[in-house]
Image: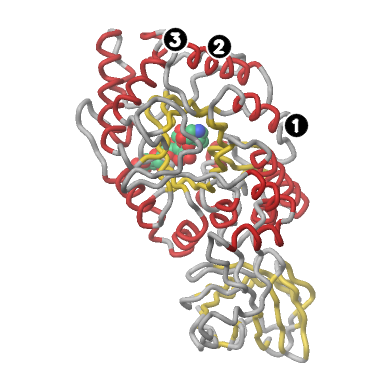
Amino acid sequence: MRDAPTHQRLDDDFSPRPGRRRRRRAPVVATALAAALPTVGAALVGAATLTPAHAADPEPLRDAAARHGRTIGVALSPGHLSQPGYAAIAEREFSLVVGENAMKWDATEPSRGQFSWSQADQVADFAETHDAELYGHTLVWHSQLPGWVSSLADPTDLRAAMTDHIDAVAGRYAGRVAAWDVVNEMWNEDGTRRDSVFQRVLGDGYVADALRAARAADPQADLCLNDYNIEGAGAKSDAMYRLVADLKADGVPVDCVGFQAHLIGGQVPSTLRSNLQRFADLGVDVRITELDIRVPTPASSASLAQQAADYRTVTEACLAVDRCTGITVWGVDDGHSWVPDVFPGQGAALLWDASYAPKPAYTAFADAWGADPGDGDPDPTDPPTAPPADGDCAVTWTANAWSTGYTGSVTLTNTSDAAWSSWTLAADLPAGQHLDQGWSATWSQSGTTITATNAAWNGTVAPGASVAVGYNASHTGDTSAPASVSVNGATCTTG
Ligand code: G3I
């Protein structure tokens, strides 16, 4: 976000404009210390400026990123906020919010001059309510473009439609948006311009026109160009690099480049860090703007481990580049990701699974940012925590049976007001049933009582969130569910 309409970068000017939040970079020495010594560095560097994390809870990602002077963002779809697990993660973890679809042309101006703000306003209000930066995505893009724009053939008319759109949308959120993806996905893979209506009718100059219009509409927002498959060196990345260099040489306002990073597990480009750095050396900020890392589904423990390593690698690349302003993940959880719709058989690309349980990728990502994982000890300064009460959990229990055995599927939901940092389920199996083995937890049986204790990656369960586990058992005819189930000593409702 820019502090003054001078069209000059003011990275070291920390004076905020009234009513707006400004990203503040930590001193380099603090960044280096925190990166090198995740736990000790976090305590030392964070002590002066940040409220320490609750000792028993993992530190929110946003707090860890703040120690590095960066933000962790999320693509938000306001329609999903009615789901408590989705809302709890979105509210807690992120310091930047971008509408997954809400600010695109088809959402904001479906008919010429007829604007629709409800989705975009919800995203902007969410950002403000939760003290997060608002990131605008996107003003000019060939996709999710209403038919009325695609059919404009007269250059004067199309240029007017484009600049009017930018003026209306960027103007409405001026003072609230930290940065805009002004033009999105303008390149083919070989580094030639993509064939869009803007390219065909207006020619190469539409990008500079769009940037100038955005600067006029919101003099304080940073103005970015955004694309995918430019994360590593290559023809497409080279084309973006040359364009940014040319725009800056010509005095066209461009402040940042967004690297979407819709990646494939095991395929983080080896040139990611050096590529981010060469763009930064042009005098622009860089950001990982749409991170997800897809794997074949159903995911295996090996692919999730590789994905976790990849999230760490991307984070380390960003942290190694001083002008990398942070990372935005393209969605909260695997149940709300665009990936399976577009790449059938692939998915599981985000940090939380479809039950809102944190995945190995979350643990690695949080660790790479230096987040305090929580040590399980109560913080003596915290008010005493109420013991779990009956009804603080809900359980569904289903059996898929054959003659001598069955597979049990169990979903635990935290219906209390407080997050679980760990959980232990206990239940009495009906007569004749015997546990063979289970997954997604550590399972054991003593007499008729079975217990399941969370795995390392699914112990944290936010209020309203669920975790799914399962087991195989033998039986002698009765495959009914346990009559009573408890979690952390409190009796659950069953259904
Ligand atoms: O809103 C309609 C709804 O009315 C209709 O019933 C439903 C039926 O399919 O479709 C809904 O629209 C969908 C829209 O998302 C909103 O949910 C579209 O079909 C669907 O194609 C659209 O997908 C979005 C995609 O961009 C469109 O290109 C994804 O959610 C969104 O994650 C994705 O985001 C893009 C970034 O903007 C740019 N970079 C790539 C990234 C992933 O493709």
Q: Name the residue located 55 percent from the left edge and 77 percent from the top edge.
A: 395
Residue 1 position within the rendered picture, expressed as x and y whole percent measured from the top left? 42, 37
Quarter where residue 211 is shown: top left
Residue 312 position within the rendered picture, expressed as x and y whole percent measured from the top left? 70, 47
* Mark 1 secondary-structure assignment: loop
Rendered image: mark on residue 204:
3
Q: Amino acid at mark 1?
A: Ser
Q: Amino acid at mark 3?
A: Asp
* Mark 3 secondary-structure assignment: loop
Sequence-wise, the earlier of marks 1 and 2 is 2
Q: Report how far apart the C-alphas of labels 2 and 3 lie in the structure.
A: 10 Å
Q: Mark 3 and mark 1 in contact (Cβ < 8 Å)?
A: no
Q: Report how far apart the C-alphas of labels 1 and 3 lie in the structure.
A: 31 Å
Sequence-wise, the earlier of marks 1 and 3 is 3
Q: Name the residue located 61 percent from the left edge and 66 percent from the top edge.
A: 58
Rendered image: mark on residue 270:
1
Rendered image: mark on residue 192:
2
Q: Which quarter holds ligand 1? A: top left
Camera-near label (1 vs 2) is 1
Answer with left or right where residue 424 lies relative to residue 302.
Answer: left
* Mark 2 secondary-structure assignment: loop
Q: Amino acid at mark 2?
A: Thr
